[in-house]
Image (spheres, rainbow, N blue to C red):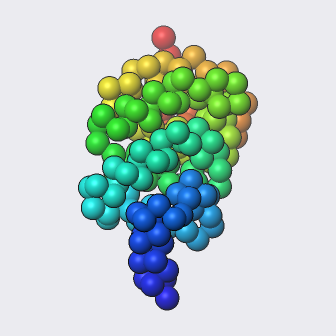
Amino acid sequence: GSRILERFLLDELFDGAANLEALARHPFANFVVQHIFEHGMPERKTRCFQMLLPYVLQHATHKTASNVVQRMLEHADVSSQALIADAFLAGEGEESLETIAATRYGSFVIHSLVDKLHPRIDAVKARVKAAQPQLSESKFSQKNILDFLGEAFFDD
């Protein structure tokens, strides 16, 4: 059953009939989108990446779409990881890296972002380090980011 749905969704995605952004947020279809990043052909991964990149900040705090953003990070090449990091570094207000890091699902995404060796890692870590007081107030970022980085990271 799910293989048939997966094949149908893949065909629909790449014929342009489906809205990939909405599928990334769907409770079940998001697994198909994740599967594309994990096992898809390079041209499909690239196309999905290009279609979803404008939404990474909104998706980072969404219950199901945040898993898609994590898969994007895990399976992207270094230059694509840098593009994702650029999006987070450019975010402002409710879509700032610091605000996203303090949310339930966003804290997992920022953890994944900090855990990669992309060209923007120093800038990302500097922003996380500067946001320590704000992140310490969130039980989500405390567990998923601050504990992961350790106390030594924040000592000067």
Residue 122 pos. (x, y %)? 39, 21
- The x, y position of residue 111, in whole percent, is 50, 40
Above/below status of 14 relative to 47: below
Q: Is residue 144 left or right of residue 38?
A: right
Where is residue 145, by image quadrant? Answer: top right
**Residue 113 place in picture, x, y as percent:** 45, 37
Instruction: State the residue in front, 98 or 4.
Output: 4
Please tell me whether residue 32 is drawn above or below residue 127 in the rendered image.
below
The answer to whether one can see residue 147 in this image is no
Above or below residue 14? Residue 114 is above
> Which residue corresponds to the image point at 38% horizontal and 25% vertical from the top-left?
120
Nearer to the camera, 104 or 153: 104
Q: Say which residue appears at 37% left-offset and 37% top-offset.
A: 81
Q: How many marks?
A: 0
In this view, which residue lies farthest toward the bottom?
Answer: 1
**Image spot of residue 88 (x, y percent):** 53, 30
Is residue 118 visible in the rendered structure shown here? yes
